[in-house]
Amino acid sequence: MTGEPVLYDAETDTLLVELRPWPAASPAEVNEQVGGEDAEEGLVVHYGTDGRPHALEIEHASERPDLVARALSALRHAKGFAA
């Protein structure tokens, strides 16, 4: 990733929320079992090489404020700011 925890691509209306740093030296070390998994409509959970969630990807983000709020809440929790 770029080091920014939240990335938005206006062209595809996709929001990526990185919950934690990549757990390996580089994303190129990913094997075929590591990747994204559809968690629900419009939400893809990306897993690190250790099998734990690494990032949340929201498709059609401008139409899914519910998922955006949940992803940002997960980011706050991952960074230790959860209420």
Image (spheres, rainbow, N blue to C red):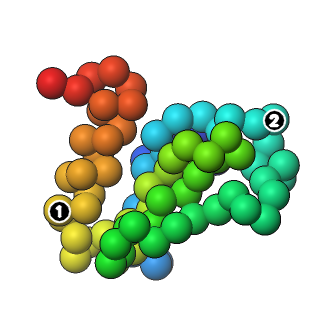
Q: Position of residue 41 (x, y in %)?
A: 33, 78
Quadrant into which the C terminus falls: top left
Q: Position of residue 36 (x, y in %)?
A: 57, 65
Examine the image and state in which quarter residue 82 appears: top left
Name the disc covering residue 57, or none: none
Name the disc covering residue 25, or none: 2
Q: Which residue of the protein is positioned furthest toward the top in this rendering?
A: 80
Examine the image and state in which quarter residue 74 appears: top left
Above or below residue 5? Residue 40 is: below
First of labels 1, 2 by sequence position:
2
| Residue 42 appears left or right of 19 | left
Residue plotted at (25% across, 41% down): 73
Above or below residue 51? Residue 79 is: above
Query: Residue flagged by tag 1: what amino acid is it?
Result: Asp
Q: Secondary structure at mark 2?
A: loop
Above or below residue 78? Residue 30 is: below
Seen from the viewer's position, the closer of residues 6 and 36 is 36
Q: Mark 1 packing: few (<14 Cα in 10 Å), some, or many (20+)?
A: few
Note whether residue 52 is visible: yes
Note whether residue 4 is visible: no
Gap between marks 1 and 2 measured at Cα: 33 Å
Residue plotted at (73% across, 62% down): 33
The residue at which mark 1 appears reads as: 66
| Residue 68 appears left or right of 20 | left
Seen from the viewer's position, the closer of residues 64 and 36 is 36
Q: Position of residue 75 (x, y in %)?
A: 35, 38
Q: Position of residue 72 (x, y in %)?
A: 29, 45
Q: Secondary structure at mark 1?
A: helix
| Residue 15 appears left or right of 81 | right
Residue plotted at (81% across, 35% down): 25
Query: Residue flagged by tag 2: what amino acid is it?
Result: Ala
Do callouts 1 and 2 mark residues in contact (Cβ within 8 Å)? Answer: no
